[in-house]
Image (cartoon, helix red, strand yellow):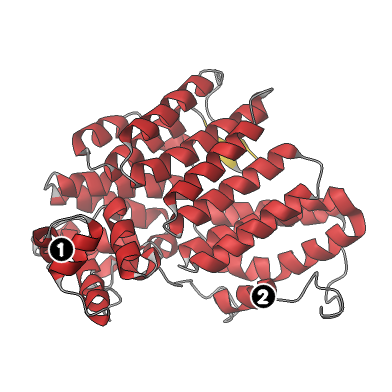
Amino acid sequence: MNDISTFGDRLRQARKERGLTQEQLAERCGITPGFISRLERGEDNPGMSTVIKLAAALGITTSRLLDNRERLQDAGRNSGIIGLRNVLLTATGLRGLEAPADRAPVPLPELERAVAQGWRLYWQGRLGELAVLLEDLIPAARATERETGAAGARPLAQAFQLAADLLVHCGSDDLAFSTARRAVRAADRGDDPLQYAAAAGTLSWATLHQGRLEEAERIALSAAEMARPSGLAAATVHGALLLSAAAPAAARGDRDAATGYLAEARVVSLRFTGGERRDYEMNFGPVQVAMQEAHALSVLREADQALRAAKRVQRPVLMPISWGAHLLDVAQARLDKGDTGGAADALLEAFGVSPEWARAQGLWRDASARTVTRARLGSQKVRKLARAAGMR
């Protein structure tokens, strides 16, 4: 069963639905009609900045062009994202309109253990299991915060962060944004400014996936300023937020801004003589800086420099799906250089990190489709990639 359409197919369909010619769309985007034509035929790589320009010109979400949608494995309950959506879209907090509480508070240590389990599932790419966990976790965290006040704000904020992160992977960008806003508001009711800044980082990421690049960059920078380093945990959050600002800067093609944020983050990382750190579920250190540099250069279509930066990225210190995301940048750079064999290697390795996570990534599926099409099933690994992507 073929579970993949190409980027070109989706672009052509959206353009025709709007009644636009390739020339008219190209004029709106500030790119050439020939490039539009090559994209629709699958002969060129779009790059994230181009995807965002095209989506804005067509008045659609980037998720539609990338075909980001729910592809969660069944984890013993069939509700999936629908169940999580129903938990999030309630009248909770609206006086006189909310339903009676359906969950009793739980002890804070128990709640914090459940949140920690949620993060383990997320970083391992076990997204279906995470969706099931969140259906129970969010109501429990809400009830606990109502009883404990500020002490319950941090686990509730992180539960909302987890939900927002999951929704981004499933293409529900607007619901992800509103859920990330809830995370920020929950953190604001607490007494931990670093948790507030970390939740704002999730909000920036959700905003980036809506294609609102300047706003995503502004949020990340504002949050980074709130977390000016006074200790190592603050340095982790501050540095990670600088890297968050670099991503939208690169996506809008501002190389100077992106490299400036990366240089500032690199200085912060010099404090980490013991290597990488993870605080507030934000990962930061010299390897994270190298990984984000490779990402920015891949987005800016500087393939040779992206691959040089990638040589400084060490798998053992990265969380599994962080490594998978890095491999997508490597694959994009390899495709830009015409190296379909190298791209296939990176895409297969990313799939091995978590098949469920990989299939949820529109960039993975599109890069796989381009790799298979260009290589024409000429090797065993390309045939294996085609099967993984649902093309055979």
Residue 59 point in image, percent of width and height: 36, 70
**Quadrant of residue 68 within the rendered picture:** bottom left
Above/below status of 239 relative to 205:
above
Tell me if mark 2 has few (under 14), some (14-19) or many (20+) residues whose alpha carbon lies within 10 angstroms of its own: few
Residue 381 point in image, percent of width and height: 19, 57
Above/below status of 251 relative to 236:
below
- Give the mark nearer the N terminus: 1 vs 2: 1
Question: Looking at this view, is 212 or 68 the one in front?
Answer: 212
Which is more foreground, mark 1 or mark 2? 1
Tell me if mark 1 has few (under 14), some (14-19) or many (20+) residues whose alpha carbon lies within 10 angstroms of its own: many
Q: Which residue is mark 1?
A: 36
SS assignment at label 1: helix
Q: Residue furthest right?
A: 147
What amino acid does circle 2 point to? Leu
Q: Which residue is mark 2?
A: 89
SS assignment at label 2: loop
Q: Is residue 68 visible?
A: yes
What amino acid does circle 1 point to? Ile
Residue at horizontal 31 percent and vertical 46 percent from the top: 329
Residue at horizontal 13 percent and vertical 44 percent from the top: 337
| Residue 118 placement, left or right of 113 | left
